[in-house]
C-alpha cells in the first residue's frame, strides 16, 4: 500500500488526519513523497490542519503527528498486518518531509 500525497487545495479536511474542520494552514515548499510532488505545478503551497494536528505541528511533535495520522488512516481504511508497518513508515516520512519544508507563517 502506497500513500499518495494530497495536500489540501481548498478542501475542508486536515491534510494529516483527514478530520474536519480545518483549523489553520501552514505554508510549505514543494517536495516529493513516494516520487510525486505534493503540489502539482507549484513551488509552494499550504498544508491544512485540524486543531489537534495544528497543536502537534506547533509543538514540533512529529512522532505524535505521525501516530495520529496513522491511527486515523487505519481506522478509516484499514490495512493488513503486513501493510501496517509500511504505511506507518510512509506517514513518518511525510511528517519528516513536511517539517523540513515548512515555511514561516506570515
Image: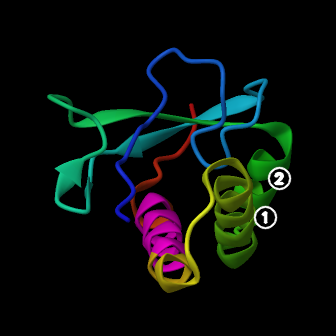
The residue to which callout 1 is attached is: 59
Q: Which mark is residue 18?
A: none
**32 left or right of 79 in image:** left
Mark 1 residue crowding within 10 angstroms, few (<14) / some (14–19) / many (20+):
few
| Residue at 84% over, 39% down | 51
Residue 5 position, x and y percent, is 37, 47
Q: Please identify the quarter of the rendering in which residue 42 is found.
A: top left
Instruction: Provide the major secondary structure of the magenta segment.
Output: helix
Element class at badge 1: loop
| Residue at 44% over, 71% down | 90
Closer to us: 100 or 96: 96
**50 left or right of 49 in image:** right
Write the start and end of the magenta stretch as one range.
87-98
Closer to us: 28 or 35: 35
Q: Please identify the quarter of the rendering in which residue 69 is found.
A: bottom right
Looking at the image, do the residues carrying marks 2 and 1 touch, with CB atoms under 8 Å apart? yes
Image quadrant in which the N terminus is located? bottom left
Q: Which mark is residue 55?
A: 2
Any magenta on residue 76?
A: no
Any magenta on residue 92?
A: yes
| Residue at 75% over, 36% down | 19
Say if 68 sits above or below 43 in the image: below
Amino acid at each position: 500500500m502506497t500513500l499518495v500525497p494530497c495536500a489540501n487545495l481548498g478542501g475542508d479536511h486536515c491534510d494529516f488526519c483527514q478530520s474536519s474542520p480545518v483549523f489553520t494552514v501552514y505554508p510549505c515548499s514543494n517536495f516529493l513523497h513516494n516520487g510525486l510532488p505534493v503540489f502539482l505545478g507549484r513551488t509552494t503551497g499550504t498544508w491544512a490542519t485540524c486543531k489537534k494536528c495544528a497543536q502537534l505541528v506547533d509543538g514540533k511533535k512529529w512522532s505524535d503527528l505521525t501516530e495520529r495520522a496513522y491511527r486515523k488512516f487505519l481506522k478509516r481504511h484499514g490495512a493488513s498486518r503486513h501493510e501496517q508497518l509500511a504505511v506507518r513508515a510512509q506517514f513518518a516520512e511525510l511528517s519528516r518531509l513536511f517539517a523540513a519544508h515548512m515555511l514561516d507563517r506570515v
